[in-house]
Image (spheres, rainbow, N blue to C red):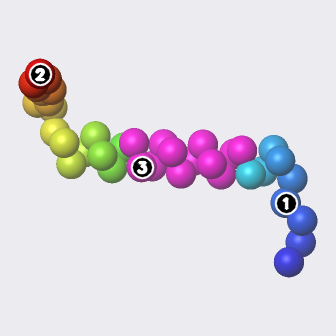
Amino acid sequence: MKPTSAETLKTYMHRVADRVGNTIAKEMGKCFGIMFDG
């Protein structure tokens, strides 16, 4: 396995975070609420 540079690793970490964020946003829809109890 070839070594991976820090820049490449950061790039792919950002891509994963963006994709996960988009997936969560798509599944949650436009309506969102938070309730605090206590």
User: Which of the image's four quarters has the C terminus?
Assistant: top left
Amino acid bearing label 2: Gly
Q: Which residue is mark 2?
A: 38
Q: Nearer the viewer, residue 30 or 38?
A: 38
Which region is colored magenta?
A: 10-21
* Magenta span main SS: helix
Kindly identify which numbered label has been placed on residue 23: none
User: Which of the image's four quarters has the N terminus?
Assistant: bottom right
**Which SS class for mark 2?**
loop
Give the quarter of the image for residue 22: top left
**Which SS class for mark 3?**
helix
Tell me if label 1 and label 2 are in contact, CB under 8 Å: no
Q: Is residue 17 left or right of residue 38?
A: right
Q: Which residue is mark 1?
A: 4
Q: Position of residue 26 (x, y in %)?
A: 25, 45
Number of other residues with Cα within 10 Å of mark 2, as a class: few under 14, some 14 to 19, many 20 or more: few
